[in-house]
Amino acid sequence: MAEIHVGGARADLTVVRSFVHRYLNTPTEHWAYPAYDTYGGSAGELSGPDLLAPILLNVSRISVRTYDELLAGLAVINERFSVPALEQTLADGGPDTLDALVDLFALLDDPGYHGVRLTTFTKILHRKRPATIPLYDEHIRRCYQEIGDPIRLPSEQGRSRTRFVRAWLTELQADLVAQRQQFEELASLAPGPGITALRALDIVG
């Protein structure tokens, strides 16, 4: 039986392929594709409309205070979002790409934004660099922190968010690289618009 895994979670590839096909081809069942993936937002740098995209990927709400704080922080976010190292895909990226991602996510600690954690932040950013910036949510957290023997990313008391992000990105990159062909095949099931292997990994997770 051919398997695919995300973190410690493993499944039959045939079953996964059927689920991903359903996710990508039955929008009437209210999956996030293609609503999130076709959301217009803005071209180029992040701007106000992009801050609302997570609502289309199952973030229940974004408060006015959250929107205002993110809007006020766009100059700094875009400065870190636009570094050349993030033009490389996560699958092909080296230490400089991981460093740039960690530096970007470090904004959640300093200065921080009301109501914004890793889930919301990645869902704002992924659309703009879908082959580089992964998506994060409770399902992905469980794949890396609760499921499997051994658990790929065990809980660690006192670990900073920055250290967690670096450890998670390292493990996720390893999964993406080792199963690149499988995730690219799953991504090809999208009828349009196209999605990346990194988005397919999130759907599987």
Image: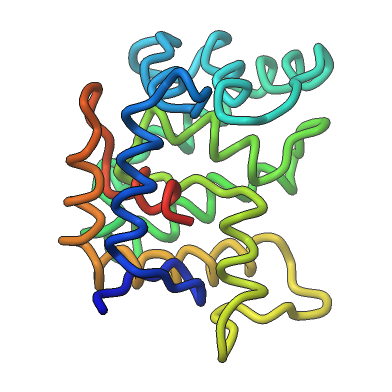
Q: Which residue is pictured at 36% across the width and 39% down the height?
A: 83
Q: Which residue is pictured at 61% across the width and 37% down the height?
A: 121
Residue 203 rendering spot, x and y as whole percentages:
43, 46
Q: Quadrant of the N terminus?
A: bottom left
Taking the image as shown, residue 60 lies to the left or right of residue 18, namely right
- Nearest the viewer among 196 and 21 is 21
Q: In the figure, 116 relative to 40: above or below?
A: below
Q: In the figure, 183 relative to 123: above or below?
A: below
**Type of colouring:** rainbow
Q: In the figure, 151 relative to 18: above or below?
A: below
Residue 146 rendering spot, x and y as whole percentages:
67, 74
Q: In the figure, 121 relative to 39: above or below?
A: below
How many marks the image carries: the answer is 0
- Nearest the viewer among 25 and 41 is 25
Residue 26 rendering spot, x and y as whole percentages:
38, 26
- Nearest the viewer among 88 and 30 is 30
Q: Which residue is pictured at 35% across the width and 45% down the height?
A: 20
As drawn, the residue found furthest toward the bottom would be 150
Q: Which residue is pictured at 35% across the width and 35% down the height?
A: 129
Residue 154 rendering spot, x and y as whole percentages:
66, 81
Taking the image as shown, residue 157 lies to the left or right of residue 103, namely right
